[in-house]
Amino acid sequence: MDMAIVILGASQYDGRASKVLAARLDEALAVAGEYSGKQVHFLTLGANMPGDRFTEAQVAGTYLIDRGVDEFRVHEVPEGNDTVGSLEAVLHEHAELLVDAASYLITDPLHTVRAKLIAKQLGWSPTVKGARNCPYHFPQKEWWGGLAHEAGGLVVAVLTGLFGKKAGEKIRGWLYNVEAIIRPRFKKRHGLIRSNAENSNHNSADNDIE
């Protein structure tokens, strides 16, 4: 029986995986090593930022192939700049792998609770694992920033489940304004996510009219 391992994207630097992304990929390889009798498929996620030559999914796929994974078992899904967008894309493109096989979702330790909730809201119930070699940990400053980000994201995910996507996006917009002050380096990604959400809502409205 096949098994699918989905790896959420993270920053890449002109084709080189960041330490965060590399930790997630190494965790995926470790999980696959525990299932030597299964045909394991790796699904790498993540689009790119404006101006980037490579997508997160592409860099992650190359990382796995360079470490001995057969190309036909690596499936790149270069869409989405956040968890929701990336998971929606992989569930749309590879539903047969995720529904018919045992599946894992790999991310950072702090992100596991929110990732599991979002996956469940999308109708998918994977085993969610945090990368054991994630480069930030308590009590580092980056760990606290990540904790604040996940707390806010969890609030958005819960409210989206209760009141719908539009309400969740409104709360997320407020939280992004706060996070931009605390963690300025995320401001560019936040702007892209907002733009993608606005385009999605606009397209949905056009479809309703048609």
Image: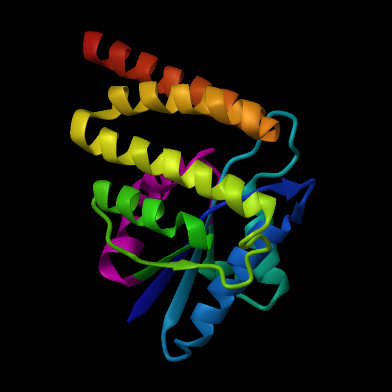
Residue at the image point whose x is 52% and y is 70% from the top: 73
Magenta highlight on residue 81? yes
Q: Quadrant of the N terminus?
A: bottom left
Among the 4 quarters of the image, the one containing residue 145: top right
Horizontal relation, residue 31 to residue 187: left or right:
left
Q: Is residue 208 magenta?
A: no
Q: Residue at x 68, y 63 (%)?
A: 135
Q: Where's residue 40, x and y in %?
A: 46, 76
Picture coordinates of residue 72, whole percent (x, y)? 54, 68
Q: Residue furthest left?
A: 162
The answer, for residue 57, to whether it is visible in the render is no
Chief SS of the magenta region: helix
In this view, the residue in front, 139 or 74, is 139
Give the number of callouts. 0
In the picture, the quarter occupied by the C terminus is: top left
In the image, farthest residue toward the bottom: 37
Q: x, y (%) of residue 165? A: 29, 28
**Above or below — where is 110 with respect to 186?**
below
Is residue 206 rendered to the left or right of residue 147?
left
Q: Quadrant of residue 161?
A: top left
Residue sitting at x 51%, y 63%: 109
Q: Is residue 17 left or right of residue 104?
A: right
Which residue is depicted at the point 58% across and 23% down?
191
- What residue occupies the far front of the structure in this picture? 139
* Residue at the top extreme, as displayed: 209
Q: Which portion, as a residue range, is magenta?
A: 76-102
Q: Is residue 103 visible?
A: yes
